[in-house]
Image (cartoon, coloured by chain):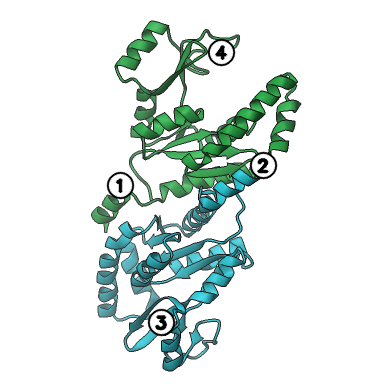
Chain colours: A cyan, B green
Amino acid sequence: MREGRGKLFVISGPSGAGKGTIVKRVVADRGAERTALSISATTRAPRTGEVDGESYFFLTREDFLRRVDEGGFLEHAEVYGNFYGTPRSYVEDRLDQGMDVILEIDIQGAMNVKRSCPDGVFIFIVPPSMEVLRSRLTGRGTDAQDVVELRLSKAREELTHVKDYDYCVVNGDLEEAVAETEAIFTAEHARVDEEVRKLIQENY
Amino acid sequence: MREGRGKLFVISGPSGAGKGTIVKRVVADRGAERTALSISATTRAPRTGEVDGESYFFLTREDFLRRVDEGGFLEHAEVYGNFYGTPRSYVEDRLDQGMDVILEIDIQGAMNVKRSCPDGVFIFIVPPSMEVLRSRLTGRGTDAQDVVELRLSKAREELTHVKDYDYCVVNGDLEEAVAETEAIFTAEHARVDEEVRKLIQENY
């Protein structure tokens, strides 16, 4: 059922679940012209190689807080003294153009978006097991053992929030996880909502 | 997310929407070992070529009514003096074995199933337009013009019931409609329900 407005897909999951890889594949497979990945705004300084408007929108603290006051973010949070937020207009403009928008954000952010966008589709990506997650985090080689333990214990806590999501995709086999995520996008476009009811009423 | 129990998919749509073709393709593509098409019971006499236990389960009126009393049908109805029903055990046994079960039934039957199986997934198949439906019904060459008009007017009434379904698949291009229907099956298996919550709790 083709519809006028795009849909908002919010994707979360523990560090190491592979959500970044899945999201990139979904955008590539469905095409960037109909699936946009939202870009966050932040007050933290750009790291080497990060480009404004690609990695993040880099804002001054003053700009960020002014936009908060203006209702310019779908959600925002302060993490270790830096602000992060999802720019409302970036998302809304693309939805209005009929594009789907993906937000890859943490659970707290996702739950805030749920309050402002209850029509969003909430997808949780999980590793096939804690053992696999451990070996993925260890395999990265970037984190010390105690950091890995911290991430694992955080992941265990995060997994209890699966109940707040609409869908849960297990990322054991990447191809399967991508196919499942893309099936969710396709199915959600066939979902009966007010727009579909109107289309049927007007066209038949 | 693999789960223990199968899921029930209820598929309806106006005559000429092509639901029979789509259902056969879904069973063939997903495999008959994991997707079963439910077989109705009826008290009407078998027509030439119809095989008991394939086309229908053919029952005597007495048998049928006894099974109604025993709660043996998920839904049943009398049409032009004959009874039709969906055998509960046929469906439940397959769901318990982890198979998905498809019921291809009319709207009245679907709404009765919704009452007894609120966890079912309800899919409505529609033609891309009334003009296409008219040409499909005329093209069959089996119905006189007044019968075609009757079917069209019934289809128009039936389309108002799309609101009672979870999904609406437009069958303009058959391959697209099949892919969409299969995506709905895949997505529904990733849906977070009590079983998924338990699996996550127990396995991580």
**Which residue matches tag 1?**
B195
Q: Is residue B67 left or right of residue A63?
A: left
CA gap, disc 4 to disc 1? 39 Å
**Which residue matches tag 2?**
B128
Q: On residue B47, which mark appears?
A: none
Q: Residue at x 40, y 62 (%)?
A: A125
Tell me, yes or no, whether the two marked residues, 3 and 4, touch with CB atoms within 8 Å. Answer: no
Provide the chain ID for the residue under circle 1.
B
Q: Residue at x 61, y 28 (%)?
A: B154
Against B104, residue A128 (above or below) is below
- Kindly indicate the quadrant of the structure image that contains residue A17: bottom left
Q: Position of residue A12 (x, y in %)?
A: 39, 66
Amino acid type for the residue under numbered disc 1: Glu
* Camera-side mark, 3 or 4: 3
- Crowding near the residue tagged with mark 2, few <14, some 14–19, many ≥20 C-alpha atoms within 10 Å: some
**Which residue matches tag 3?**
A84
CA gap, disc 3 to disc 1? 35 Å
* Camera-side mark, 2 or 1: 2
**Which residue matches tag 4?**
B50
